[in-house]
Amino acid sequence: MKIEQKEKISSSNRKTEQHAFQRKLPQTGTVLRRTKSFYYVNVGEAEPRLCRIRGNLFQGNLHKNKIAVGDEVEIDLNVAEDAGWILSVLPRRTKLARRPAIGIPEQILVSNAETLLIVASLRNPPFRAGLVDRFLVAASCGGLEPLLILSKADLSNEAEIAPIKEHYSALGCTVLVTSIPDSKGLDSLRELLRKRISVLSGHSGVGKSSLIAALFPDWEIRIGQVSKKSGKGRHTTIMAEMFPLPQGGFIVDTPGIREFAPLVKPEELDKHFVEFITFLGQCKFKGCSHRHEPQCNIKEAVTEEKITEQRYRSYCSLYDSL
Ligand SMILES: Nc1nc2c(ncn2[C@@H]2O[C@H](COP(=O)(O)OP(=O)(O)O)[C@@H](O)[C@H]2O)c(=O)[nH]1
Ligand SMILES: [Mg+2]
Ligand SMILES: [Zn+2]
C-alpha cells in the first residue's frame, strides 16, 4: 500500500479515536465484485462499500486470489465515510475453484453459491453432453446443487428432449426445459433463482444473456460483460461479478467458468460421477482408474449398460485432462 494511503487511514483512525463512542463495530458483508483497487462489499445498503484487505491479513502471502466473489467478510468501517478494511474471511460453505496452473495458486472463482446453472442448448449450438458432465463434476466438487437448463427448446422436439431430460434427472439433477419465443420454463426458472446465489455457466451462444434478459426485462445489468483479467481501468471487474436480483437472490457471472477444469484429483474423479459410486471399490486393482486396467467393475457396469457409454466417455476425457 502506498504511504499516503496509509497516512490517510491512520489520520482517519485518529479522528475516530477522538469520538470513540461513535466507533462502529466490525460488521459482515458479502463481496460482490473486485477491481484492481477495491473489493465491493454488500452490507445490505443501497450501495456496496469499497474495501481493501488489511495488510497483514494473509501474512505477506500473495493475497490476490484469497478473497473471491461471494465471500462473506468481516469489515471495519471506521476508515472513512464509505470505505472499509477487510479484517477476515468467514468460512466458506461452497466454492467453485479453478485448477491451479504452474506457478499460479488455486483460484477460487465464486464462494458460497448454492446453485450452478448449467445452460446447454438443445440445438444451435448442439447439445454437448461432455461439457454438461464437466460442469456436473465442478458442482459436485464445490458442494453446489446443479440445475441443468436445456435451452432453445423451440428448435428441438419432444422426442429429442425427453431422453436427455430423463438421463440427467436420473442422475439426481434438476432439469428445466426453456424456450424464450414460447416463454417456456421462464416462470419456474425465476422461482428457482429466488433467495439463492446462482452461478451462470455454459458454452457461449447457448442463450445465457437472453435468458436473464427474458426473466428480468426491466433489469439493467451487464451479464456477459465481466472482463477476464485486470483490465486497463481501475474499475474493471476481475474474475466474477455477483448481481443482486430484483426479486431477491443473486446471480454470478464469470467468464472464467467457460474454459473451466474443475479442481479435483484424478483419483477422486470417479466419486463425482454419481452413478459410479455403487460400483466403486470392487475393481481388481486398488486405485483403479477405470480406463486400461483389467477386471474393472466400472467398465463391466458400462458393458452391462448400468452406466452409459456417454458418461463413461466423459469420465475418461476429464480424467485425461486432469
Ligand atoms: N430459437 C431460440 N434462440 C435463442 C433462445 N435463447 C437465445 N437464443 C439466441 O441464441 C443466440 C445466443 O444467445 P446469447 O444469449 O447471446 O447466448 P450466451 O452467449 O450464452 O449469452 C442469440 O442469437 C439469441 O437470440 C431460444 O430460447 N430460442
Ligand atoms: Mg452472453
Ligand atoms: Zn476400475
Image (cartoon, helix red, strand yellow):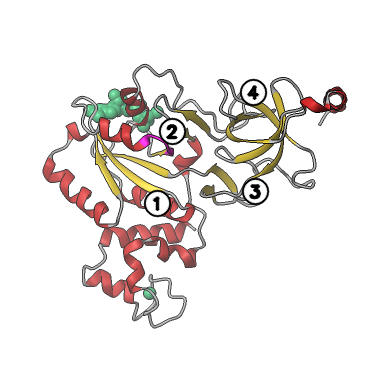
Residue for badge 2 = 249
Of labels 2 and 3, the one closer to you = 2
Q: Which residues are magenta?
A: 193-199
Question: In the rendered structure, which disc, 4 or 1, sits on the residue that comes first in sequence?
Answer: 1
Residue for badge 4 = 232
On the picture, is 25 further left or further right than 312? Answer: right
Q: Position of residue 194 (x, y in %)?
A: 38, 34
What secondary structure is marked by label 4? loop
Q: Nearer the viewer, residue 179 or 131?
A: 179
Residue for badge 1 = 134
Q: Position of residue 45 (x, y in %)?
A: 57, 23
On the picture, is 222 further left or further right than 86? Answer: left
Determine the image quadrant of residue 137. bottom left
Tell me the crowding category of disc 1: few under 14, some 14 to 19, or many 20 or more residues within 10 angstroms, Cα based.
many
The span from disc 4 to disc 2 (Cα, nearest Å) is: 30 Å
Q: Is residue 85 above or below residue 259?
A: above
The span from disc 1 to disc 3 (Cα, nearest Å) is: 22 Å
Question: In the rendered structure, which disc, 1 or 2, sits on the residue that comes first in sequence?
Answer: 1
Of labels 4 and 2, the one closer to you = 2
What residue sits 47% from the left and 34% below the top?
Answer: 252
Q: Is residue 203 magenta?
A: no
Residue for badge 3 = 104
What secondary structure is marked by label 2? loop
Q: Amino acid at mark 1?
A: Arg
Q: Nearer the viewer, residue 15 or 315?
A: 15
Determine the image quadrant of residue 88. top right
What residue sits 44% from the left and 51% below the top?
Answer: 138
Quarter holding ligand 3? bottom left
